[in-house]
Image (tube, rainbow, N blue to C red):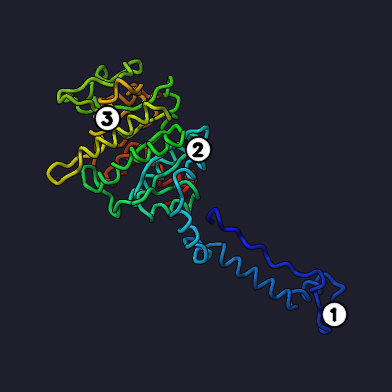
Amino acid sequence: MSLNQRQQPLPTVAKHGLLMSSRASFSASQPQGIVYSFLFSRSGLLSVLALFLLLVVFVPLPGRRPMSALFYDDGPVSRWKDYTVARAAAFAARNDTLIVTSVSEPFLPMLNNWLISIARKKRQDQVLIFAEDYATLYEINRRWPGHAVLVQPAPDSNAAHDYGSRGFFNITSRRPRHLLDILELGYSVMYNDVDIVWVADPFRYLEGDHDVYFADDEVAVKPSSPIPYEQVKPLNHSHDLPPPGANGKTYVCSCMIFLRPTRGAKKAMSSWIEEIQNQPWSDNKPTHDQPAFNSALNKTAGEVDLYLLPQAAFPSGGLYFRKGDWVERTRGLHAIVHNNYIVGLQNKIQRFKDYGLWLADNHTDESPLGQI
């Protein structure tokens, strides 16, 4: 039931409406007679009929939406289409902080998995989802009213776009604009990709009062396999922007970002938007939002207070899912696990299942969305 639906009260029977026929009057003094007289009076029959209709309309059978959806669908559709980022942020924020992601319809099961992991840390109420198509907007708000918003125009996202595709770029390139909108409203914001699982609360690692917090994938591109433990950044590594690699570029991940509503964070997001515009996707040169994010961080590093998060707490998929004993040696330090360095929605789901991180099959009772 949406925010604007209200169940109609059962019709009230008038105080003097229990009029009995002479046929039933002999039993009026008995409790059974009163019930019998009421049920077969005009008011009684109307009340029973009204109760039956309410049950049919508002109580769904297993696997079926309630008939009330037929009467109310137009209302929520119109309301959520006009739902603004400002209203959505004010609704979901807790302590002036939001946790956001962006998602299209094919990735709703992955979204649910992410949400369950957040709900286990008691932070689901401050989640705001940027829907990247109308089907996603309406479905999330039908199940969990107020927690999804769509910034128009919506990209074409009917397919589960793989990494590196034009569809993937069209969705992810909208990310810095979403984040800048939140910052301009005065909120701190944590962004996550939906192929992330929380294994601990990441907020405990947001030390200090910096503008932009981020993770990196640098170790995942090193040639050795398995990765020797000494190559992995320890918890006490430098939190400065990593030095460029052999190709002259940093390898910071745009999957997990925390921003405070400061001038520096807004400058970094504005620069990211500009870099995306300067690095458009084409058939000859496919790209995505992450190189633009790295360019923006490097260009604004002297003006923005940047903070590299500990790699042991924020491992990439290229590190966490590789063979070796790194996971065991760092157990207890992990905050989030990013399921990257693998392409394809079903491949990601299967890898989560293989490592016991797929929660969306057996723990849907813990999700605010239920079973998707």
The amino acid type found where label 2 is placed reads Ala
The amino acid type found where label 1 is placed reads Ser
The residue positioned farthest toward the left in the image shown: 284
Determine whether, in the image, residue 228 is placed left or right of residue 315.
left
Circle 1 SS class: helix
Around disc 3, counting alpha carbons within 10 Å, would you say few (fewer than 14), some (14 to 19), or many (20 or more)? Answer: many
Q: Is residue 252 something that shows in the picture?
A: yes
Measured in 3D between alpha carbons, the distance from the residue under mark 3 to the one under mark 2, in whole angstroms, is 27 Å
Q: Is residue 225 something that shows in the picture?
A: no
Around disc 1, counting alpha carbons within 10 Å, would you say few (fewer than 14), some (14 to 19), or many (20 or more)? Answer: some
Query: What's the mark number on residue 93?
Result: 2
Residue 68 in percent (x, y) is at: 53, 64
Residue visible at 35% across and 46% down?
A: 103
Q: Which residue is mark 3?
A: 296
Measured in 3D between alpha carbons, the distance from the residue under mark 3 to the one under mark 1, in whole angstroms, is 86 Å
The amino acid type found where label 3 is placed reads Ala
The quarter holding residue 193 reads: top left
Above or below: residue 267 compared with residue 75: above
Mark 1 or 2, which is nearer the eye?
2
Mark 3 or 1, which is nearer the eye?
3
Measured in 3D between alpha carbons, the distance from the residue under mark 1 to the one under mark 2, in whole angstroms, is 62 Å
Closer to the chain start, of discs 3 and 1, is 1
Closer to the chain start, of discs 1 and 2, is 1
The quarter holding residue 268 reads: top left
Determine whether, in the image, residue 205 is placed left or right of residue 48.
left
Q: Which residue is mark 1?
A: 25
Observer-nearest residue: 354 or 102?
102
Above or below: residue 302 compared with residue 59: above
Circle 3 SS class: helix
